[in-house]
Image (spheres, rainbow, N blue to C red):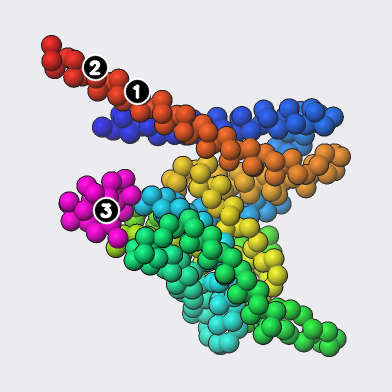
Amino acid sequence: MKRQQLQRAAVTAASSVLAVFVALLISAVILLITGKDPVKAFTTLFGAAGDTRVIQGSLNRATPLMISAAAVAIGFKMNLFNIGVEGQMRVALLATAVVGAAVDLPAPLHIALCLVVAMASGAAWSGIAGWLKVKRGVNEVISTIMLNFIALSLVAWAFDDFFRVESPNESVLVKTKELPKSAWFPDLVDRRLNGMLLVAIAVLILFWVIVWKTRFGFRLRASGGNPGAARVTGVHPQRMILISMLLSGALAGLVGMRALLGDVHAYQNNLAEQQGFNGIAVALLGRNHPLGIFFSAILFGFLGEASGKLQLEDIPKEIATIMSGIIVLAVVIINEAVKRWDDRRIQRKAATELEKVAA
């Protein structure tokens, strides 16, 4: 059994690595077509890995991606596609900014309150999709997409109409009140690397423990893999759906906290934009495993941070974005091909064993 698990893990890791190489090859072709030197582009891009500032910036960018991908992966383990992380994050950002600015507490308690409010807000919003799935059979992809639009519009309306702050020069700033310093999450490296990285790593560790090392995690995976068989063993799939959506939304609420508690300290337009959607790509490349998510998030964070170096060499930095998109497409295609190959391999092996028994 262990040998089979190791083989599956090796195949899974190899498929993701292959997707990255495919993305590099396609990106090289695109660069050649546009008259750019791919060797120079990749040397510049990956040569930035030796720059301490780039590494710190990459880790900062990777922090919300780790949490966002974990939120998506919990849904995937239950065979649910929570595409609403962006909306859940946006609701949590505004709620946390308002509540955090309205109270005065000692630093540890203030930060803890902000994190709890963020998780509760995200869970409440995702719980709507869970309830619709359980009680009305509404597909979670449709409901979470619609809830994204509602959340973004609702938050934009409330933000523009009720949260205008007068600055010292009497101009009007469209943002919430700034959080007190007691709510600021401390830096690991002053103004370069925020401590929310440790929270993101803790989320991945807890995700691994809960999903792979607890009875609840077994029930979660069993319900996602075969709801009928899980029901026979006493697991309630409908309840697991609701719990999974609540957990996914709770993590989604934490996605924007590095930006809110670590950088800006007030809610404003474009704060942590697209982090919810980007988490889907990271989860896919990481194959919904905490270790894979960790390295995938760092890769995406590095591509985003190091892309600025390309402009110095007259190479469009958008090539890093194109590369990220190709990685996602490649990993989906390759993963499906590998899954089919692995299924055929298992079927052939089972048929061979049956033939031996029959003989």
| Residue 203 picture quarter | bottom left
Q: Is residue 195 visible?
A: no
Q: On screen, 314 above or below 58?
A: above
| Residue 6 picture quarter | top left
Secondary structure, magenta segment, majority class:
helix
Q: Secondary structure at mark 2?
A: helix
Residue with the mark numbered 3? 219
Tell me which segment is drawn in magenta: 217-238
The first of marks 3 and 2 along the sequence is 3
What is the three-letter code of the residue carrying label 3? Arg
Q: Is 76 placed left or right of 194 in the picture? A: left
Q: Quadrant of the C terminus?
A: top left
Circle number at residue 321: none
Mark 1 and mark 3: Cα distance apart in space? 27 Å
Mark 2 and mark 1: Cα distance apart in space? 11 Å
What is the three-letter code of the residue carrying label 2? Thr
The first of marks 1 and 3 along the sequence is 3
Is 93 in front, or is 229?
Answer: 229
Residue 56 x/y as whole percent: 66, 53
Residue with the mark numbered 1? 345
Is 103 in front, or is 256?
Answer: 256
